[in-house]
Image (cartoon, rainbow, N blue to C red):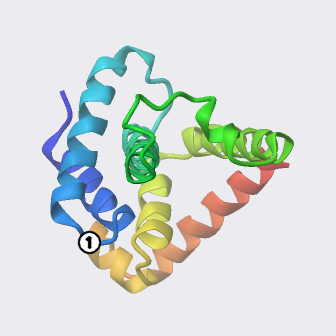
């Protein structure tokens, strides 16, 4: 159900999130893929890849939290959504989640091309030229223009 290209993108992103560990990246990717397959019916939006990468991001965070609990001797009990609030100021966390929801909604409004370019630029840290090469675009100038339009659309959504 998940295309090979999408799975590879999820794995590359997971590897970046876990700072290069191939085994951890594989674990994160597999967990995220299983969750995505179970939740496929809930997908709404234009960018399947952005949705899959957000699942990968959240899975990596949950697995990190479970691992840190295990190190502290707290066991590896399942992580609940409320656990994200246990360690900090709840108001700040709620505001951050609201901003995240606005941003996610904005990402869903972008075209798939815009989302791909933002992913290459901000998640992979590629230059305009590198992103253009990776996406098969003629030059970095067109990537820059699409990026500018995408960022402006996100700014409008988050306001």
Answer above or below: position of 131 versus 29. below
- Is residue 59 visible in this depiction of the protein? yes
Please determine whether, in this image, residue 83 is positioned above or below residue 99: above
Q: Is residue 141 above or below residue 90?
A: below
> Residue reaching furthest front?
73
Residue 113 percent location from the top left of the image = 43, 54
Relative to residue 99, is residue 37 drawn left or right? Answer: left
On the image, the x and y values in percent for residue 90 come to 80, 40
Q: Secondary structure at mark 1?
A: loop
- 146 left or right of 74? right
Q: Residue at x 72, y 60 (%)?
A: 152
The location of residue 78, given as percent across then percent down, is 41, 28
Q: Residues within 10 Å of mark 1 (few under 14, many from 20)?
A: few
Q: How many marks?
A: 1
Residue at the spot 67% in from the left edge and 46% down from the top edge: 103
Left of 44 or right of it: where is 130? left
Within the image, what quadrant is residue 1 found in? top left
The residue drawn where x is 76% and y is 39% is: 98
The front one of 104 and 25 is: 25
Q: Most extreme residue toward the top, as rendered?
A: 41
Label 1 belongs to which residue?
20
Q: What residue is drawn where x is 28% and y is 63%?
A: 15
Q: Nearer the viewer, residue 147 or 118?
A: 118
Q: Position of residue 68 (x, y in %)?
A: 44, 52
- In this orientation, does residue 138 appear? no
């Amino acid at each position: 159900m998940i295309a090979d290209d999408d799975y590879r993108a999820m794995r590359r992103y997971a590897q970046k999130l876990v700072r290069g560990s191939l085994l951890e990246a594989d674990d994160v990717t597999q967990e995220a893929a299983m969750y995505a397959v179970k939740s496929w019916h809930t997908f709404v939006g234009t960018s399947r890849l952005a949705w899959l990468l957000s699942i990968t991001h959240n899975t990596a965070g949950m697995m990190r939290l479970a691992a840190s609990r295990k190190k502290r001797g707290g066991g590896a009990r399942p992580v609940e959504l409320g656990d994200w609030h246990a360690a900090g100021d709840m108001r700040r966390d709620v505001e951050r989640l609201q901003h995240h929801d606005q941003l996610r909604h904005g990402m869903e409004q972008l075209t798939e091309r815009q989302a791909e370019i933002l992913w290459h630029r901000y998640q992979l840290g590629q230059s305009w030229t590198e992103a253009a090469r990776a996406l098969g675009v003629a030059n970095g100038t067109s990537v820059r223009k699409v990026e500018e339009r995408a960022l402006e659309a996100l700014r409008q959504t988050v306001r």
